[in-house]
Amino acid sequence: MQMSRHGERYPTTSAGDRHLELLSRIREQNIPLNGSLSFLNNWTYFTTEPQKDFNQLTRTGPYAGTLQAFTTGIRFLTRYSHLLPHTTQTRLWASDSERVISSARYFAAGLFGLDWENSSKATLEIIPETFDRGADTLTPGDTCLRYLEDTATGHDMGINMLSAFQDAYIPAIATRLLLSENNHGLKSLSNVEVYSMQEMCGFETIARGSSPWCDVFTRDDWENFAYARDILHYYRAGPGNPYAGAMGWLWLNATAALLRAGPEEGSMFFSFVHDGDIAPFLAALDILKDGKYDPSLPTTHAVEDRVWKTSSVMPMGGRIVLERLSCSSGTGDVFVRVNINDRHVPLPYCNSGPGGSCRLQDFVGHVERRGREVGDFGEVCGLEGDVGRITFLRQG
């Protein structure tokens, strides 16, 4: 299983700073606001220190991510208890981020019991998020040099495409808030400022349970915001990014080797990463991509029939489970089934097995083909020398 930690992969402090800058500008105008923005006349944000308080959003409030991680562990115990080893210790892996590690620990408490760290049931291994790890990493977005430096089609591609779509949908919202609702005193609202308003609906809801910002926008506004989030993730590290496949193939290949080896290598493997590291895995797996659009998801308008929806692909605490199925029919056939956030998703290129699964040998063959298609990680990323491979993903 690969599970994301709760919240953004890249620093949420930048979002908090944007929010505070907008609120500061509004206060400096010192004018009463009308219409849907009138609540601002007697409202305060839940934090003045986003760098500190945003990190606590996963631990407090009605939608605490730690609670979700713990609950997920209990659900896994219910579903997979027959696979838990009784004589050996299960090793889990988490990338070296406080929230990732916290998610892993709460999940382990749900699966193995509250005393898991003081027992022989499980142990957690932290994998550094450092550039020198090369391919032996859970966070290839931190070790792929060209991805980091390429401002056109690397990591920045997501924010660039997001900006383009913001140009398409936000100006009309700004006009409505300023003119139709008689808030001329604000003079203007930039794309970033309106987008920050929409972001604050989510942040405040997590912290307080609800937010007046949510009522500022129409259903169409929220549909566009959801699509904007899809654009960001699709092009930043998902199927729309040219580096994503090579980055995600590292974990996919290591996992395929474990599936091929079978129970002798261990019955359960759990990796905890950022949402920005789940997206490349999906790109490597060649699933949930929007191939019907050319070149891909448009930035001029939202498309309703898209496959990639961040709310279902990578929600808070998103998880992907690869299940190895052995049938008792006597044929000896072994299959692989993909479970994304508690939903079995048949692979479009291999789904004739039980429950939409794929025959193991066909799955392994596909992984090998994808390796050739996406390219060698070191070469794609412009890394010199032997960059290695994932070596830690093993029990015992």
Image (cartoon, grey):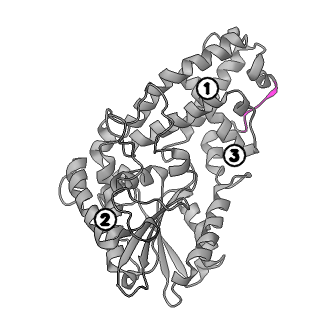
Q: Which mark is residue 206?
A: 3
Q: Residue 45 sits in which quadrant?
A: top right
The answer to whether residue 393 is above or below residue 285 is: below
User: Is 385 situated left or right of 51 in this image?
Assistant: left
Per the picture, the main secondary structure of the magenta-coloured stretch is loop
Q: Nearer the viewer, residue 117 or 198?
A: 198
Label 1: element kind = helix
Q: Give neighbour class at mark 1: few <14, some 14-19, many 20+ (Cα, 10 Å).
A: some
Q: Are marks 3 and 2 in contact (CB under 8 Å)?
A: no
User: Is 150 situated left or right of 78 in this image?
Assistant: left
Q: Residue at x 62, y 13 (%)?
A: 175
Q: Which mark is residue 21?
A: 1
Q: Residue at x 30, y 37 (%)?
A: 150
**Mark toward the start of the polypeptide (2 vs 1):** 1
The stretch of residues the image draws in magenta is 42-46
Q: Residue at x 73, y 51 (%)?
A: 61
Q: Position of residue 343 (x, y in %)?
A: 53, 60
- What amino acid is at disc 3? Ile
From mark 2 to mark 1, how far is it between C-alphas?
44 Å
Q: Give neighbour class at mark 3: few <14, some 14-19, many 20+ (Cα, 10 Å).
A: some
Q: Position of residue 201 (x, y in %)?
A: 67, 36
**Mark toward the start of the polypeptide (3 vs 2):** 3
